[in-house]
Amino acid sequence: MKRTLSAILLMSLLLSLSACAIPTLPRTKTESDPEEIPEVQETEPAVIIPETPEPTPAPTPDPYADKPDIDINSWEFQLTNSYNSIGEYQPPYSVFEGQGINENIVEQATAFVKAAREAGFSAYCSTILRNYEFQDSHYKSFVYNQAADAVDAANRMLGPGLSDHQTGLAIDFTDDASYNAFYGSFDDAYMKDTELYQWLVEHCTEYGFILRYPEGKEAFYGTPCNHPAHFRYVGKEAAAYMKEHDLCLEEFIILYDPSKVFLPQP
Ligand SMILES: [Zn+2]
Protein backbone atom coordinates (compact mmCIF):
# COMPACT_ATOMS: atom_id res chain seq x y z
CA MET A 1 0.00 0.00 0.00
CA LYS A 2 2.81 2.36 0.91
CA ARG A 3 4.54 1.63 -2.42
CA THR A 4 1.39 2.39 -4.34
CA LEU A 5 1.00 5.75 -2.61
CA SER A 6 4.60 6.60 -3.45
CA ALA A 7 3.97 5.75 -7.07
CA ILE A 8 0.96 8.02 -7.18
CA LEU A 9 2.87 10.87 -5.59
CA LEU A 10 5.66 10.45 -8.10
CA MET A 11 3.20 10.46 -10.94
CA SER A 12 1.54 13.63 -9.63
CA LEU A 13 4.87 15.35 -9.33
CA LEU A 14 5.78 14.51 -12.89
CA LEU A 15 2.45 15.78 -14.16
CA SER A 16 2.72 19.08 -12.30
CA LEU A 17 6.25 19.60 -13.61
CA SER A 18 4.96 19.04 -17.11
CA ALA A 19 2.17 21.63 -16.59
CA CYS A 20 4.70 24.24 -15.41
CA ALA A 21 6.84 23.90 -18.50
CA ILE A 22 8.22 27.29 -19.74
CA PRO A 23 6.18 28.44 -22.74
CA THR A 24 8.06 28.65 -25.99
CA LEU A 25 8.75 32.24 -26.94
CA PRO A 26 8.97 33.21 -30.59
CA ARG A 27 12.50 33.20 -31.80
CA THR A 28 14.16 36.45 -32.47
CA LYS A 29 16.92 36.96 -34.93
CA THR A 30 20.35 36.80 -33.42
CA GLU A 31 23.74 37.66 -34.77
CA SER A 32 24.52 34.06 -35.08
CA ASP A 33 21.52 33.35 -37.33
CA PRO A 34 22.38 32.93 -40.94
CA GLU A 35 21.13 35.69 -43.24
CA GLU A 36 17.77 34.94 -44.74
CA ILE A 37 18.04 34.44 -48.41
CA PRO A 38 15.23 36.28 -50.17
CA GLU A 39 13.20 34.16 -52.38
CA VAL A 40 14.18 34.76 -55.97
CA GLN A 41 11.25 35.15 -58.22
CA GLU A 42 11.59 33.65 -61.56
CA THR A 43 11.18 36.34 -64.22
CA GLU A 44 10.85 36.14 -67.91
CA PRO A 45 14.12 36.96 -69.61
CA ALA A 46 14.01 40.52 -70.99
CA VAL A 47 13.36 40.51 -74.67
CA ILE A 48 15.68 42.92 -76.36
CA ILE A 49 14.13 44.44 -79.39
CA PRO A 50 16.71 45.72 -81.75
CA GLU A 51 16.22 49.37 -82.54
CA THR A 52 14.86 49.80 -85.98
CA PRO A 53 14.74 53.16 -87.69
CA GLU A 54 11.31 54.78 -88.04
CA PRO A 55 9.92 53.76 -91.37
CA THR A 56 9.89 56.66 -93.76
CA PRO A 57 6.26 57.36 -94.61
CA ALA A 58 5.51 57.02 -98.24
CA PRO A 59 4.94 60.48 -99.67
CA THR A 60 1.23 61.21 -99.97
CA PRO A 61 0.46 61.88 -103.58
CA ASP A 62 -0.72 65.46 -104.04
CA PRO A 63 -4.35 65.17 -105.18
CA TYR A 64 -4.04 68.61 -106.74
CA ALA A 65 -0.80 68.05 -108.62
CA ASP A 66 -2.76 68.41 -111.85
CA LYS A 67 -4.17 71.84 -111.01
CA PRO A 68 -4.35 74.22 -113.94
CA ASP A 69 -1.39 76.41 -114.75
CA ILE A 70 -3.02 79.76 -114.04
CA ASP A 71 -1.99 83.08 -112.53
CA ILE A 72 -3.83 83.29 -109.22
CA ASN A 73 -3.18 87.05 -109.14
CA SER A 74 -5.18 87.58 -112.31
CA TRP A 75 -8.48 89.51 -112.17
CA GLU A 76 -10.62 86.33 -112.46
CA PHE A 77 -9.58 85.32 -108.96
CA GLN A 78 -10.16 88.56 -107.15
CA LEU A 79 -11.47 87.49 -103.77
CA THR A 80 -13.94 89.15 -101.49
CA ASN A 81 -16.05 87.55 -98.78
CA SER A 82 -17.01 88.06 -95.14
CA TYR A 83 -13.36 87.96 -94.12
CA ASN A 84 -11.61 89.49 -97.14
CA SER A 85 -12.38 93.03 -98.21
CA ILE A 86 -11.52 94.71 -101.50
CA GLY A 87 -12.19 98.13 -99.98
CA GLU A 88 -13.54 100.64 -102.46
CA TYR A 89 -12.18 98.85 -105.51
CA GLN A 90 -14.23 99.28 -108.65
CA PRO A 91 -13.55 97.20 -111.76
CA PRO A 92 -13.56 98.53 -115.31
CA TYR A 93 -17.15 97.98 -116.34
CA SER A 94 -19.54 97.82 -119.26
CA VAL A 95 -23.31 97.57 -119.41
CA PHE A 96 -25.00 94.18 -119.75
CA GLU A 97 -28.72 93.44 -119.41
CA GLY A 98 -29.23 96.98 -118.15
CA GLN A 99 -26.64 96.69 -115.39
CA GLY A 100 -22.96 97.24 -114.86
CA ILE A 101 -20.68 94.24 -115.34
CA ASN A 102 -16.91 93.73 -115.26
CA GLU A 103 -15.92 94.57 -118.84
CA ASN A 104 -13.72 91.47 -119.03
CA ILE A 105 -16.69 89.09 -118.98
CA VAL A 106 -19.31 90.64 -121.22
CA GLU A 107 -18.81 87.98 -123.88
CA GLN A 108 -18.83 85.08 -121.40
CA ALA A 109 -21.91 86.36 -119.55
CA THR A 110 -23.71 86.88 -122.84
CA ALA A 111 -23.02 83.29 -123.89
CA PHE A 112 -24.13 81.92 -120.50
CA VAL A 113 -27.43 83.81 -120.36
CA LYS A 114 -28.13 83.10 -124.05
CA ALA A 115 -27.59 79.37 -123.50
CA ALA A 116 -30.01 79.34 -120.55
CA ARG A 117 -32.67 81.07 -122.63
CA GLU A 118 -32.08 78.74 -125.57
CA ALA A 119 -32.57 75.82 -123.19
CA GLY A 120 -36.09 77.16 -122.66
CA PHE A 121 -35.78 79.13 -119.44
CA SER A 122 -36.86 82.62 -118.51
CA ALA A 123 -33.51 83.73 -117.15
CA TYR A 124 -32.87 87.21 -115.81
CA CYS A 125 -29.91 88.79 -114.15
CA SER A 126 -31.22 90.28 -110.95
CA THR A 127 -27.92 91.63 -109.68
CA ILE A 128 -24.54 91.91 -111.36
CA LEU A 129 -22.18 94.76 -110.41
CA ARG A 130 -22.69 96.59 -107.16
CA ASN A 131 -20.17 99.25 -106.39
CA TYR A 132 -18.92 100.10 -102.94
CA GLU A 133 -21.33 102.99 -102.38
CA PHE A 134 -24.32 100.98 -103.52
CA GLN A 135 -23.42 98.04 -101.30
CA ASP A 136 -22.88 100.42 -98.40
CA SER A 137 -26.33 102.01 -98.68
CA HIS A 138 -27.95 98.70 -99.58
CA TYR A 139 -26.45 97.09 -96.49
CA LYS A 140 -27.53 99.94 -94.23
CA SER A 141 -31.08 100.05 -95.54
CA PHE A 142 -31.39 96.27 -95.33
CA VAL A 143 -30.32 96.29 -91.71
CA TYR A 144 -32.42 99.39 -90.96
CA ASN A 145 -35.57 97.96 -92.52
CA GLN A 146 -35.21 94.82 -90.50
CA ALA A 147 -34.34 96.66 -87.31
CA ALA A 148 -36.44 94.28 -85.26
CA ASP A 149 -33.85 91.68 -86.02
CA ALA A 150 -30.95 93.87 -87.01
CA VAL A 151 -28.22 91.53 -85.84
CA ASP A 152 -29.65 88.69 -87.87
CA ALA A 153 -30.05 91.01 -90.85
CA ALA A 154 -26.43 92.17 -90.54
CA ASN A 155 -25.36 88.56 -90.54
CA ARG A 156 -27.27 87.85 -93.73
CA MET A 157 -26.05 90.82 -95.74
CA LEU A 158 -22.48 91.58 -96.67
CA GLY A 159 -21.13 95.02 -95.91
CA PRO A 160 -19.36 97.29 -98.45
CA GLY A 161 -16.06 95.88 -99.70
CA LEU A 162 -17.17 92.33 -98.91
CA SER A 163 -19.68 91.61 -101.67
CA ASP A 164 -18.72 89.37 -104.57
CA HIS A 165 -20.87 91.67 -106.70
CA GLN A 166 -18.35 94.48 -106.23
CA THR A 167 -15.94 92.58 -108.49
CA GLY A 168 -18.46 92.80 -111.32
CA LEU A 169 -17.81 89.09 -111.93
CA ALA A 170 -20.95 87.76 -110.24
CA ILE A 171 -24.47 87.30 -111.53
CA ASP A 172 -27.57 86.56 -109.47
CA PHE A 173 -30.11 84.77 -111.61
CA THR A 174 -33.86 84.85 -111.25
CA ASP A 175 -36.77 83.67 -113.34
CA ASP A 176 -38.81 86.68 -112.27
CA ALA A 177 -38.75 89.41 -114.89
CA SER A 178 -40.25 91.88 -112.42
CA TYR A 179 -37.46 91.43 -109.91
CA ASN A 180 -36.12 94.74 -108.72
CA ALA A 181 -32.60 94.62 -107.34
CA PHE A 182 -33.27 97.77 -105.33
CA TYR A 183 -36.02 96.09 -103.39
CA GLY A 184 -33.85 94.59 -100.69
CA SER A 185 -36.29 92.17 -99.13
CA PHE A 186 -37.10 90.28 -102.34
CA ASP A 187 -36.87 86.63 -101.42
CA ASP A 188 -35.60 84.35 -104.17
CA ALA A 189 -34.66 81.44 -101.93
CA TYR A 190 -37.20 79.46 -103.96
CA MET A 191 -34.76 79.58 -106.89
CA LYS A 192 -32.96 76.56 -105.49
CA ASP A 193 -36.00 74.42 -106.29
CA THR A 194 -36.32 75.55 -109.87
CA GLU A 195 -35.26 73.77 -113.02
CA LEU A 196 -33.47 76.94 -114.10
CA TYR A 197 -31.24 76.69 -111.04
CA GLN A 198 -30.49 73.05 -111.78
CA TRP A 199 -29.60 73.90 -115.34
CA LEU A 200 -27.33 76.76 -114.27
CA VAL A 201 -25.50 74.55 -111.77
CA GLU A 202 -25.06 71.83 -114.37
CA HIS A 203 -23.84 74.05 -117.20
CA CYS A 204 -22.15 77.06 -115.55
CA THR A 205 -18.60 75.72 -115.86
CA GLU A 206 -18.98 75.45 -119.65
CA TYR A 207 -19.11 79.26 -119.65
CA GLY A 208 -16.42 79.80 -117.01
CA PHE A 209 -18.78 80.30 -114.05
CA ILE A 210 -19.07 78.54 -110.69
CA LEU A 211 -21.74 78.39 -108.01
CA ARG A 212 -20.05 80.86 -105.67
CA TYR A 213 -21.50 79.77 -102.33
CA PRO A 214 -21.88 75.98 -102.25
CA GLU A 215 -23.42 74.60 -99.09
CA GLY A 216 -20.98 73.13 -96.58
CA LYS A 217 -18.18 75.58 -97.45
CA GLU A 218 -19.36 78.39 -95.20
CA ALA A 219 -16.18 78.16 -93.11
CA PHE A 220 -14.31 79.51 -96.13
CA TYR A 221 -16.60 82.29 -97.34
CA GLY A 222 -18.67 83.21 -94.26
CA THR A 223 -21.95 84.88 -95.16
CA PRO A 224 -23.22 84.04 -98.62
CA CYS A 225 -24.86 86.57 -100.88
CA ASN A 226 -28.56 86.67 -100.08
CA HIS A 227 -29.44 84.98 -103.34
CA PRO A 228 -28.82 81.27 -103.90
CA ALA A 229 -28.52 81.43 -107.68
CA HIS A 230 -25.32 83.45 -107.45
CA PHE A 231 -22.76 82.50 -110.09
CA ARG A 232 -19.26 83.86 -110.37
CA TYR A 233 -16.86 84.00 -113.30
CA VAL A 234 -13.42 82.39 -112.81
CA GLY A 235 -12.61 81.16 -116.34
CA LYS A 236 -13.40 77.83 -117.96
CA GLU A 237 -10.28 75.96 -116.89
CA ALA A 238 -10.50 76.92 -113.21
CA ALA A 239 -14.28 76.41 -113.14
CA ALA A 240 -14.00 72.88 -114.55
CA TYR A 241 -11.26 72.01 -112.07
CA MET A 242 -13.15 73.37 -109.07
CA LYS A 243 -16.24 71.42 -110.05
CA GLU A 244 -14.29 68.20 -110.61
CA HIS A 245 -12.54 68.50 -107.22
CA ASP A 246 -15.49 69.99 -105.30
CA LEU A 247 -13.58 73.15 -104.38
CA CYS A 248 -15.03 76.54 -103.58
CA LEU A 249 -13.20 79.66 -104.79
CA GLU A 250 -11.35 80.10 -101.49
CA GLU A 251 -10.11 76.50 -101.50
CA PHE A 252 -8.95 76.86 -105.10
CA ILE A 253 -6.97 80.02 -104.35
CA ILE A 254 -5.40 78.38 -101.28
CA LEU A 255 -3.92 75.69 -103.57
CA TYR A 256 -1.82 78.41 -105.17
CA ASP A 257 -1.27 80.97 -102.40
CA PRO A 258 -2.76 80.43 -98.92
CA SER A 259 -1.70 83.93 -97.89
CA LYS A 260 -4.35 85.35 -100.23
CA VAL A 261 -7.24 83.92 -98.21
CA PHE A 262 -7.78 85.11 -94.68
CA LEU A 263 -9.76 82.63 -92.59
CA PRO A 264 -10.97 83.42 -89.05
CA GLN A 265 -9.70 81.16 -86.29
CA PRO A 266 -12.35 78.66 -85.23
ZN1 LIG B 1 -25.35 87.52 -105.40
Image: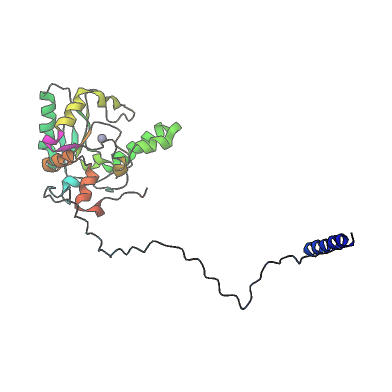
Quadrant of the displayed image that contains ligand 1 = top left
Q: Residue at x 16, y 36 (%)?
A: 95
In-front residue for pair 254/231: 254
Q: Residue at x 9, y 36 (%)?
A: 107
The image shows residue 256, relative to residue 16, as above or below, that is: above
Question: Does residue 144 appear left or right of residue 166 in this picture?
Answer: right
Instruction: Check the image and name the residue furthest to the bottom.
Output: 31
Question: From the image, which quarter does the N terminus lie in?
Answer: bottom right
Q: Residue at x 18, y 37 (%)?
A: 210
| Figure quadrant of residue 244 | top left
Q: Which range of residues does the magenta coloring cover?
A: 204-213
- How many discs mark residues in the rendered view? 0
Q: Residue at x 14, y 42 (%)?
A: 241
| Figure quadrant of residue 18 | bottom right
Kindly tell me whether residue 28 is visible in this rendering: yes
Question: Does residue 43 appear left or right of residue 69 in this picture?
Answer: right
| Figure quadrant of residue 216 | top left
Q: Give the percent coordinates (x, y) of residue 31.
A: 62, 78
Q: Give the percent coordinates (x, y) of residue 4.
A: 86, 60
Kindly tell me whether residue 179 is visible in this rendering: no
- Residue 205 in the magenta stretch? The answer is yes
In-front residue for pair 16/230: 16
Question: Does residue 200 appear left or right of residue 46 in this picture?
Answer: left
Instruction: Check the image and name the residue furthest to the right.
Output: 2
The image shows residue 34, relative to residue 168, as above or below, that is: below
Q: Give the percent coordinates (x, y) of residue 98.
A: 18, 31
